[in-house]
Structures are given as C-alpha cells and as structure tokens.
Amino acid sequence: MLKRRKNPCGGWLWFLAIIFSLSPIELRAANLSIITSYPPSFYEPFQKAFEKSNADVSVTIIQRNTGSATRFILGKPEPAADLFWASATDAFELLKQKGALSTVQPRETNAPARILGYPVNDPDGFYLGFALSSYGLVYNPAYLAQYDLPVPQSWQDLLKPVYAGHIGITSPSRSGTTHLIVEALLQTYGWDRGWALLSELGGNLSTVTARSFGVASGVAQRRFGIGVTIDFLATAPDVSGAENVFVLTPDPIYVPASIAILSQAKNRNVAERFIDFLFSREGQSILLLPNIARIPVLPELNAHLLPRPDSGGLLAAHGLDAPLSARRYGIVNLLFDDYIVRRRASLARLWSRLRELERVLLDDPAQFKVLAEARRLLGKPPISEEALQDLADELAGEWPRSIARTPQQQALAREIRAEIEQNLTRAEGLLRSVSTASEQR
C-alpha cells in the first residue's frame, strides 16, 4: 500500500491562503481612535488617505460637537480615544488644564508662529495647529434685497436696529467656534462692554440654532438673512450653490484648527504617525479640497490665502488669552444661554423699545438720562468680572451635562438667573416710565 506523503509546505500554503483571503480591514493590527467635532465630509478624506498609506492601521472616528467632546473626554475614567481633533483652541486649553492631554513629540510643522496675534501652536507643546480658518459673517443677497437691508461689514454693524430679527447664531455651549467668537469679543472689548455688545446682538437675533452648521444652512434657506460663522461652514457642501456670501470684517479673526494626543491614549505611536500625516504635503493638500476649504499651514500651499500681518484683526493687539478662556469656559456658556438664548424674546422687545425712545427723545436730556440707565441694565452682565475671578475652578470651568450639578453650582445658577430677571425688570420699568411721560407731554 502506498502511503501518502505529507507536503512540508502544506501548512504554510494553508496559512497564506487564509491571510490573503482576509480583507484589508481584517489585516490591520492597530486601531487609532479619534474624537472630533468635524463632520464626515471633513474627516473621511483624511481617514481614507491615512489608512491607504498605513495598511496596518484602522481609524475609528467618534464624532461629537466640541462641547460634548470635551465633556465626553473629561467624564470617562477609561481612555476615551487617542486623539482630539477640532477647531476651537480654547477647548484644547481646557483639556490641557484638566490634565487630559499629553505633550506631542516636537516636530517642524512649518506653520507661522502667529496669525494676526493668535499663536498657531500651544507654547507648551500640548496641541498643534494644522490648519487655519477665519471668522466672519455669512449673508444671503436675495434675502437682503427682499428686506432692503444693507450688506453688513463689521461686528458693530450687527447691533444696528435695521438688522433686528434678521440674524442667526448658535450657542457657545453647543459650538466651540461660537464660544471662541464670544471670548474674542469679551477679551477685546472687556467683560462689561463685551456682554453689553452680546446683549444688544441678542436683541437683534432671529434665532439661535442648535448646531454650528445651522447658521449657514438657515441663511441658505432664507429663514434669516445674516449669520455669525466660520469660513468653512459658510461654504460647506450642504449649502453650496445657495447664494451664500461669506465676508470678513475689517478686524477679522483667524484661528488654528488643532490636534492633540490624549493623556490616556493607548496607541500613542500610531497617533504620532497620524499627526505626521496631517503635516505632510499629502495631508495638507487635502485641506484645499472644496468640501473642506481650510488654509494649510504649509507655506508652499497657503500663498495668497493668509491675511497681511498689518490687517488689524480683532485679536491682533493682545491675542487671545486661551488659559483665561479655558478657566471660565463653563460660566461663559451658562451666562450666554441664560442671558442671551433664553431671554432672546425679552431682549428683542426691550432693545426695540429702547431704541425707539432714544430716537424720539434725543433732545430731552432728563428722559435720555433715564434711558441711559435702562441701556446699562440691559447690557449689564449678571456676574461681575471681579466676582468671576473669585469663583472656584469647579464653578467657573466646564459643567459636565452628564453629571448632576453640585449644590454650589445650582446656587450660582439661581443667583445668575435672579440677577438677569432683576436687571431686565428694572430696565423695563424705566422704559415704561419714559413712555408714560412722553405720552403725557
């Protein structure tokens, strides 16, 4: 009887057959987890290009808005992800202060040190700016023509009575980009004047959208005519062809979009490889795709895309104090929601009445003095800058939504709401008294 001889290569052939039958995803040995505020239209081109050149890595994306992402990272005892990838620099600073970030390996990114006063990279090396964006105004020409409105040119223009009921914005508690705009105004004009501007803007709002992209979308749909937004959202794919026009103000804000490694990252080496890819020519070129539309930091790709150094941006004189913004991140969001968002209808009514009386009684010094006090009360922040500085970090910083508020947080929230109601009630009383006096003349 003939005995069957074993093929010494049979085992290897069987093994190779199994290997080559696997899909590329099944062959990947490492998983890179990224939490980001960017939509799929942004991150998918990077994800696909990186996986194509790094066949051993599979990228998992956790997509959340900036505020939700920071709360998610800070609220998880186990590792949340390897990388944090977003546009709002003050969110990175908040995570840095909370010990949630790890320093990134030093590398030459060729990025400018500053852009109109704003540092592109974290001086301490915890996050790096890989792209640049500008903040400004988006408007719909057909809408402006319909309501015979002039094209807005500046942040101050948004306070004009002619724009009452025609402006949209999103809340900084739901949008890191909006939070940065709010902080830029507060730091440029000061706490008191900054909140007075935001209150008067609140009186002109048509709506407060649930998400950042809702601003440009609302303008495109002509639900309102003007929005406060960032360049790439104004020209996003879902609003392209909608006649939207994005304009920079004379004092524009340019800020970096950044990336950081989380302190509990499981795959740090792979995270560093992804950062290297972002700063490579291939990665930087992806930023120029129409559906992404960011400004690369690589000099050979950003010619004619950056503003002149003497453009005089809103933050050019003093820059943005990111640590200050991070320390008061939560309280600023709380104030905006309670003062601007929830009182929007009251602000619209009271500011409209005040402006009308100011116009009619301009030549009446006594009554105009009363109106000046009403204006002060309408624009008065419900907590002073001095009191804010004395707040403990857990009261001024981020208030995670997934965690019940402490008794101290609840008490502070009640005090803020009571102060807002008192200021608005007093302002309304003054306006009523002036109206009565003018009617009796």
Image (cartoon, rainbow, N blue to C red):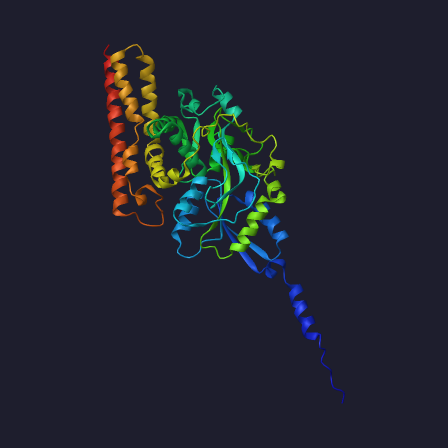
Examine the rendered structure and indicate whether residue 129 appears above or below residue 241. below
Examine the rendered structure and indicate whether residue 349 appears above or below residue 337. above
Q: Is residue 1 left or right of residue 285?
A: right
Nearest to the observer: residue 122 or residue 372: 122
Examine the rendered structure and indicate whether residue 323 appears above or below residue 48. above
Q: Residue at x 28, y 18 (%)?
A: 371
Report x, y in % for residue 99. Answer: 40, 50
Report x, y in % for residue 189. Answer: 38, 27
> Can residue 383 be spotted in the picture?
no
Examine the rendered structure and indicate whether residue 402 appears above or below residue 348. below
Q: Residue at x 26, y 45 (%)?
A: 408
Nearest to the observer: residue 389 or residue 2: 389
Query: Which part of the image, by quadrant, shows the C terminus?
Result: top left
Nearest to the observer: residue 350 or residue 337: 337
Report x, y in % for residue 173. Answer: 39, 40
Farthest residue to the bottom: give it.
1
